[in-house]
């Protein structure tokens, strides 16, 4: 029961955040885009506030919300750095990540987002297949 | 007002990630591992998020302008170019390596800091490299 309730309710909240963000600010809620705005845009305070909210909200994990699966054993810094570089660079080159393309783009039936989501899902699945 | 609503959206998004356990890379890798012990959580999260997000999109279509800004700033391009394809492919490889996409990567700063610090530094660096390259 809880195994379906939590992902369902969590997804609804994520979608609600995206919907409110869209109808109030007129923008697509994409984390990689907001991060880039917070880093490189002149007006960086508002995107920075979003990111602070994101980290505070996320820190509810395992305290206010259940944790049913343990964290993986701490992986090597080398792997994490390669992963971070690819995610940081790839999401900018491809104009979006799981939130911008996946959640918002699919909801808008954007052809670019449908293609992007198909590709990053495929390469992620292949990567896990070969690294696990 | 826009500051307040932006903070609320960030909190909601982060709490949604936490509630759905997307903040845990083991759950994400469990989803991507379709040939192994598959964990379907992510598809449920994505399905319900897209559903609510779509309602928001339909509401926005009926609005003349957003509530707290003057103009819509939505992507309009429909062209599938090399940048989109290559960027998404690279992102997927990075995502599969660690199980972190940008949101859960950032929340790992507090949830799993021994990993989060390296991932986020590299995430910022990767984003900066693109920014410098295209400036």
Image (cartoon, helix red, strand yellow):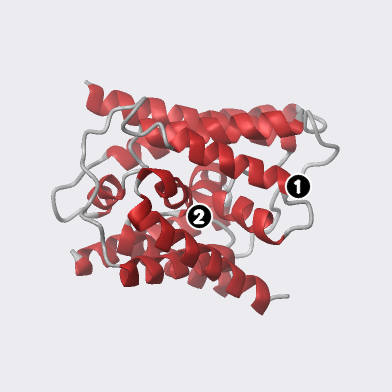
| Residue A50 position within the rendered picture, expressed as x and y whole percent measured from the top left | 62, 40
- Check the image and name the residue furthest to the right: B70
Q: Are marks 2 and 1 on the same chain?
A: no
Q: Quadrant of residue A64?
A: top left
> Could you tell whether B91 is left or right of B43 in the image?
right
Q: In the image, is residue A117 above or below residue B15?
A: below
Q: Which residue is drawn at 57% across and 69% down?
A: A93
Q: Position of residue B100 (x, y in %)?
A: 38, 54
- Residue at figure coordinates x 21%, y 64% from the top left: A129
Residue B128, above or below A29: below
Asked whether disc 2 touches disc 1, contact meaning CB atoms under 8 Å apart, the reply is: no
Q: Which residue is drawn at 54% across and 54% down?
A: A113
- As drawn, the residue found furthest toward the left would be B37
Q: Residue at x 53, y 62 (%)?
A: A91
The spot of residue B44 in percent (x, y) is 34, 35
Q: What is the count of numbered marks? A: 2
Taking B74 as reference, is B98 left or right?
left
Question: Percent x, y for residue B89?
Answer: 43, 68
Q: What element carries label 2?
A: loop
Crowd band around label 1 with a 10 angstrom C-alpha radius: few (<14), some (14–19), many (20+) = few
Residue A104: mark in rendering: none
Q: Which chain carries label 2?
A: A
- Whether residue B64 is visible to the viewer of this picture, yes or no, is yes
Badge 1 marks a residue whose secondary structure is loop
From the image, which quarter does the N terminus of chain B lie in? top right
Q: Name the residue under label 2.
A: A97
- Which circle marks residue B73 in the picture? 1
Q: Quadrant of residue A2?
A: top left
Question: Front-most of B58 and A64?
Answer: A64
């Amino acid at each position: 029961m809880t195994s379906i309730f939590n992902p369902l309710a969590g997804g609804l909240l994520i979608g609600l955040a995206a919907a409110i963000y869209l109808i109030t600010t007129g923008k697509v809620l994409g984390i990689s885009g907001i991060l880039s705005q917070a880093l490189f845009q002149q007006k960086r305070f508002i995107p920075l506030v979003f990111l602070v909210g994101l980290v505070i909200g996320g820190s509810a994990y395992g305290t206010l919300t259940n944790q049913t699966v343990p964290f993986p054993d701490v992986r090597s810094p080398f792997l994490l750095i390669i992963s971070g570089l690819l995610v940081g660079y790839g999401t900018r080159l491809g104009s979006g990540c799981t939130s911008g393309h996946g959640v918002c783009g699919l909801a808008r039936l954007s052809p670019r987002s449908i293609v992007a989501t198909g590709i990053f899902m495929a390469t992620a699945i292949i990567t896990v297949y070969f690294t696990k | 007002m826009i500051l307040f609503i932006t903070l609320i959206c960030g909190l909601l998004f982060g709490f949604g990630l936490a509630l759905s356990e997307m903040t845990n890379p083991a759950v994400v890798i469990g989803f991507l591992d379709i040939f192994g012990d598959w964990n379907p959580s992510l598809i449920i999260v994505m399905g319900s998020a897209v559903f609510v997000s779509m309602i928001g999109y339909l509401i926005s279509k009926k609005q003349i302008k957003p509530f707290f800004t003057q103009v819509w700033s939505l992507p309009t391009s429909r062209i599938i170019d090399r940048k989109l394809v290559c960027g998404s492919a690279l992102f997927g490889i990075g995502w599969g390596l660690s199980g972190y996409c940008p949101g859960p990567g950032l929340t790992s700063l507090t949830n799993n800091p021994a990993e989060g610090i390296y991932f986020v530094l590299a995430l910022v660096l990767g984003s900066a490299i693109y920014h410098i390259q295209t400036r």
